[in-house]
Amino acid sequence: MKGHELLTTRKAIENRRSIRKYKADTIPDETIMALLESARLAPSGCNAQPWRFKIVKDYATKKQLQAIAYDQSFLTEAPVVLVICADVQGYLDGRTSGVQDLGKIGVFNSNICEILNKKTKSKSQMSIENLSLSVAFNVAIAIEHIVLRALDFGLGTCWMRLMDEKAVRKIFGWNENIYPVALLPIGYPGESPAPRKRMPLSDLLIV
C-alpha cells in the first residue's frame, strides 16, 4: 500500500498491537472495503459465512457505543468502529446449503453430509444464546483477518468484547438473530505500545 510496505503474515502477527489512541485522520472508504474483503474470505464451518458488519463513522453513534462499552473512550477517538456480528439464522441457513455444496463437489461423502445435517438440525434447537456463542467462533476468524490486514495500511485496531450485546442490538434496531461479537475501532495509531509479555511456547504444550 502507498507509504507502507506490505508485511509478511509473520511480521503482521509480530507487529500487531491493541491500539487505544488514534489520530483524527480519516480512513478512505476503499481501505475499509479492503479490510472487509479480507474478512469475507475467512473460513467458516461448512462455509456458512455468518459474519455481518456495521460500519460506524458518526460521532453520535460512536458515543452510544462507548456508553454501552463501559465508557471506553477510545471508541469515539477512532475514525471508524466496526460492529461485527454473527447472523444466527444466516448461519443455520448457510450451514445447510454449505453442506450440500461441499457434498456435490466431493469434499464430503454422503455419510458425512448426513451427520452434518443432523448436527445442524440439533443446533437449531439450542437456545438462541448458546447458538449465538457457537456461531461467534466462526466470526472470530473473520475479525482476526481484519486485524492483521489493517497493518498493511498502517492502521491499528483493538478487539473489544466488553460491551452490553442487548444494548448494541437496541441501538441499531436488530432482532435477536443478530449477535454482536465484537466492537473493532480502527484508525491510524496515536501510540506505539511495547509488546505485551507472552508465555513461552514450552508452557503452552500439553504433555
Image: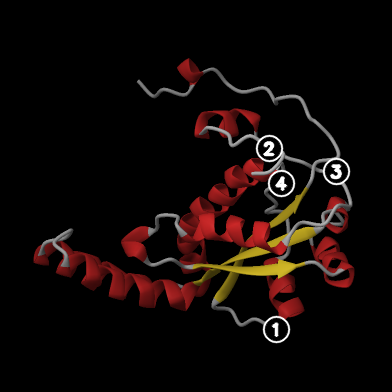
Query: Residue 4's mark?
Result: 2
Q: Are marks 1 and 4 in contact (CB under 8 Å)?
A: no
Residue 64 visible within the image: yes
Alpha-carbon span between mark 1 and mark 3: 29 Å
The earlier-in-sequence mark between 4 and 3 is: 3
Alpha-carbon span between mark 1 and mark 4: 25 Å
Q: Which residue is mark 1?
A: 173
- Front label number (2 vs 3): 2
- Judged from the image, the secondary structure of the residue bearing numbered disc 3 is loop
Residue at the (37%, 78%) spot, across then down: 93
View extreme (front): residue: 2
Which amino acid does the dot numbered 2 rest on? His
Judge left or right: residue 80 versus residue 205.
Answer: right
Residue at the (70%, 25%) spot, across then down: 195
The earlier-in-sequence mark between 1 and 4 is: 4
Judge left or right: residue 46 versus residue 20.
Answer: left
Alpha-carbon span between mark 4 and mark 3: 10 Å
The earlier-in-sequence mark between 4 and 2 is: 2
Alpha-carbon span between mark 2 and mark 3: 20 Å
Quarter of the image that includes the C terminus: top left
- Judged from the image, the secondary structure of the residue bearing numbered disc 1 is loop
Judge left or right: residue 35 versus residue 132.
Answer: right
The earlier-in-sequence mark between 2 and 3 is: 2
Which amino acid does the dot numbered 4 rest on? Cys
Query: Residue 21's mark?
Result: 3
Q: Residue 123, located in which quarter of the rendered image? A: bottom left
Query: Residue 176 or 73: which is nearer the viewer?
Result: 73
Alpha-carbon span between mark 4 and mark 2: 20 Å
